Every structure is written in C-alpha cells, then in structure tokens.
Amino acid sequence: MVYVIETIKNSHCDQREAISHKNCFEKNKIILKLKNLKYLIMKRIIMLAFLAVFSLLACKDNAVSRVKKENLESAKKRDANMKGAPIVKFDRLVHNFGTVDEGDVVETIFKVTNVGESNLIISKAKASCGCTVPTWPKGAIKPNETAEIGVKFNTSGKKNKQSKTITLTTNTEKGRETVTISGMVTPKK
C-alpha cells in the first residue's frame, strides 16, 4: 500500500483524479514498475562493473613472476640427469583371428618390448568393447625386457566382421599405445 500512496503523491494526475479514475491509477502503477526496472538494471550494471574491475586486478601479476628460481634450477638438473623415455615395440600391432563361430572365445598374446632407456609402466589397458578383456603386466618393464599383453575376445552376440582396439595407458612420450584384434564371426544358424 505504501507504493500506491507514493505513486499518487508523485502522480502526473491530481489526487482527486487518481482516486476517481482507474486510468490514472494504472498509469502510476506502470511508472512504478518502470522505476523498479531501472533500479534492477542499474544494480546489474554496477555488479558487472565491479566484477570486471576485480578480474582485471586479480590478473595483474603474471605467472612468470610467481615461479621460484630454486624450483626452476632443480627441474633443470632433474631433466639433465633423466634418462630417455621408455619406447614400446610390439611384435605386431594387429592380430587377425581368422574365421570363428559365434559364441567362441578367442585369445591372443601381444609381446611388448621396452627398447627405451627407462622403465616402461602400463598403468591401464582398456578395450573398445566389453566383449574384449585385456590383461597386462602390473609391474615395471625394464629396458630391453619383454612382457605379454593378453587379449580375450568373447564372440557371443557378435556377427560378421569384427575389429576391437585395446588402448594401453603408458609412461611413453605418446602416453597411449594401441593394438587391434580383428576377424570374421560366423553367425549361429
């Protein structure tokens, strides 16, 4: 009710007109709504200006000034003493299991050799499909050593030409290595 009285006092109509005529009253309500809208718009503009100034001040320091020289020197020494990254060499990248019947479980082994200068670690092996299950060595593969990556493929529910990729997460330069199995599955009759 405070707003209504205020609009009558600040009205473009005189008080008798405001009380007796609905049009004048409605006009004052609209003016009040416009004033509230202007207030909200100004409030948002001020908030946006505050955020803009704050973000500019927060980014004043550059990242280079925050780097400690001692940490930089120790990183340079560490990198100079570090041996080369491990390098993976597979006996083959693709295994074709030929033609098999639907429902068969086929298996193969990929031999992986570390031809790099530091230990190779395979932290994860993931197949492109749940029907394919890889196994991998959980320990480090030392330089010039060979290990086995086992792959089982369950052909149940699979028909015709099949191709599945096994992705190995490693500590090599690329970070990921892949091998593939493929073949033809004869559907059940």
Image (cartoon, grey):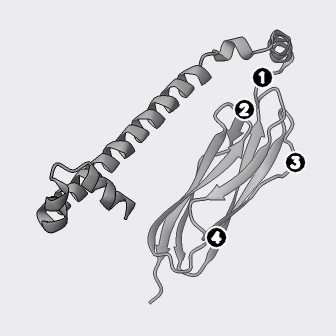
Q: In terms of depth relative to the viewer, which is nearer, 112 or 139?
A: 139
The tag earlier along the polypeptide, 2 or 4, is: 2
Tag 2 near tag 1, CB within 8 Å:
yes
Secondary structure at numbered mark 1: loop
According to the picture, the residue beneath numbered tag 1 turns out to be 84
Foreground tag (1 vs 4):
1
Calculate the distance from the C-alpha at mark 4 to the C-alpha at mark 3: 26 Å
Q: Is residue 188 toward the left or the right of residue 76 in the image?
A: left
Question: Residue placed at 48% from the left, 65% from the top?
Answer: 162
The residue sitting at 14% across, 67% down in the picture is 20
Q: Which mark is residue 87?
A: 2
- Marks 1/4: CA–CA distance: 37 Å
The residue at 32%/59% (across/down) is: 5
At x 13%, y 60%, the residue is 17
N-terminal of the pair, mark 4 or mark 3, is: 4
In the foreground, 2 or 152: 2
| Residue labelled with disc 3 | 139
Residue in front for this viewpoint, 60 or 17: 17
Q: Position of residue 48 (x, y in %)?
A: 45, 34
Neighbour tally class for label 2: few under 14, some 14-19, many 20 plus, Cα within 10 Å: many
Q: Secondary structure at mark 2?
A: loop
* Lateral position of residue 176 relative to residue 116, left or right: left
Q: Secondary structure at mark 3?
A: loop
Q: CA distance from mark 2 to mark 1?
A: 9 Å
- Estimate how packed mark 1 is, as few (under 14), some (14 to 19) or many (20 or more) residues with alpha carbons within 10 Å: few
Residue 71 in view, yes or no: yes
Decide which of tag 3 and tag 1 comes sooner along the chain: 1
| Side (left or right) of 132 relative to 19 | right
Q: Position of residue 155 (x, y in %)?
A: 56, 75
Q: Earlier in the sequence, mark 1 or mark 4?
A: 1
